[in-house]
Amino acid sequence: MKRRKFVKQCGVAGLACAVGPSVLSSCNSAFYVPHVVDGSKIIVNKIEFPAESNYVLVKNKRLPAPLYLRRNDEDSFTALLMECTHKACEVQPFGDQLHCPCHGSEFSSTGKVLEGPAEVDLRKFKVTTDAEKIYIS
């Protein structure tokens, strides 16, 4: 990441946190949801999504980092391992992106690399749903 872009992003992040989470959701605390494990699937109830957020986090001891579970629309979800593919640091949600605090890599909400040094997309999990639950394989 170039110095100018870094300074600009730091200024925007500081301003966002100063303005308050009621205006910008990127300063909100992470919301971890309860889940159950059934074999190789993690199951989350759809009602766990707060109305004011389009993502939740799922922490499971079998995984090296939490999962970022994003609601794309009513029945479409994306699940990403929040582990940077550059040096395995835990990435952090920031608006509609995921940022690595260690070396500055940036990823889209679908896990695609937007800015290096990471060159590989985040690990993505298969997600299926029914009327009440989300299944992450």
Image: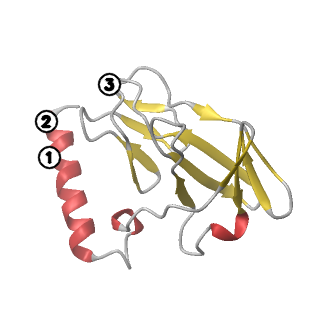
Residue named by callout 1: 7
- Of the residues under marks 2 and 3, which one precedes in the sequence? 2
Question: Would you identify the image quadrant in which residue 36 lies?
Answer: bottom right
- Up/down of 21 relative to 87, above or below: below
Name the residue at 14% across, 46% down.
Answer: 7
- Which residue lies most toward the right here? 131
Q: Amino acid at mark 1?
A: Val
Residue highlighted by disc 2: 3
Can residue 75 be seen in this snapshot? no
**Tag 2's secondary structure?**
helix
At horizontal 36% and vertical 40% (from top left) the residue drawn is: 90
Q: Which amino acid type corresponds to the residue marked 2 in the rendered image?
A: Arg
Residue 15 percent across, percent down from the top left: 21, 66
Residue beneath disc 3: 87
**Marks 2 and 3 in Cβ contact (< 8 Å):** no
Identity, as a three-letter code, of the amino acid under mark 3: Lys
Label 1–label 2 contact, CB within 8 A? yes
The correct choice, above or below, for 24 with respect to 100 in the image is: below
At horizontal 61% and vertical 43% (from top left) the residue drawn is: 79
Q: Residues within 10 Å of mark 1 (few under 14, many from 20)?
A: few
Q: In the image, which is nearer the foreground, mark 3 or mark 1?
A: 3
Give me the C-alpha separation between circle 2 and circle 3: 21 Å
Disc marking residue 29: none
Residue 132 horizontal/vertical position (percent): 81, 64
Q: Nearer the viewer, residue 129 or 61?
A: 61
Residue in the image at 42% along x and 35% along y:
83
**Number of other residues with Cα within 10 Å of mark 2, as a class: few under 14, some 14 to 19, many 20 or more:** few
Callout 1: SS = helix
Left or right of 20 in this view: 122: right
Q: Earlier in the sequence, mark 3 or mark 1?
A: 1
Examine the image and state in which quarter residue 114 appears.
top left
Pointer 3: residues within 10 angstroms few (<14), some, or many (20+)?
A: few
